[in-house]
Amino acid sequence: MSDINPGPTDSGKPAPRQTDRWLEPGSTNALVIYILYLASLVIGVTAIVGIVLAYINRGKSGGFVESHYTFLIRTFWIGLLYALISVVLMMVAIGVVLMFAVAVWFIARCILGLQALQRGEPVKDPESWFLGL
């Protein structure tokens, strides 16, 4: 037998699997979204999964994690805006440099958010257009 799902509990409902925790609102879910965002630099579609998770869980976790969900959602949309502007400006050749700057900005925002999350702190300015410091 498999120990993935241990079977029903006393209440008759199946016991939750250990892997289900990362889908629930909270710091583990925010951590997964940060990782999905960083992975999107290599595998582009993971950012879409991350933004969907952020929207689904925003407003459900409470506490310091709420600032992270706001920060994550804004990171996605602002990053997309910056990337689109960079693509348009590639015709003038400055877009390549700007796209590099957008990637650095995106990575820095994710790392700073991850560090705050690991310390159990909210993002100081989740609505910032820069780094949220």
Image (cartoon, grey):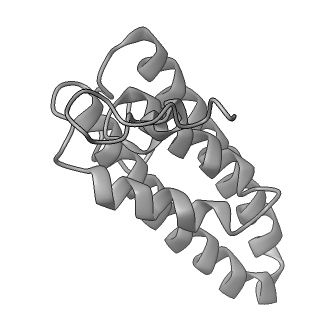
Residue toward you, 126 or 114: 114
Q: Is residue 101 above or below residue 26?
A: below
Please state, as top left, top right, bottom left or bottom right, where the C terminus lies in the image: top left
Residue at image location 51% in from the left, 33% down from the top: 31
Quarter location, residue 66? top left
Left or right of 96 on screen, residue 128 = left
Left or right of 50 on screen, residue 96 = right
Residue at image location 29% in from the left, 24% down from the top: 122
Residue toward you, 84 or 32: 32
| Residue 131 visible in the current orientation | no
Left or right of 61 on screen, residue 81 = right
| Residue 11 visible in the current orientation | yes
Q: Position of residue 121 (x, y in %)?
A: 32, 16
Q: Is residue 22 above or below residue 52?
A: above
Please state, as top left, top right, bottom left or bottom right, where the N terminus lies in the image: top right
Q: Position of residue 117 (x, y in %)?
A: 43, 22
Residue at image location 77% in from the left, 72% down from the top: 94
Q: Position of residue 76 (x, y in %)?
A: 48, 60
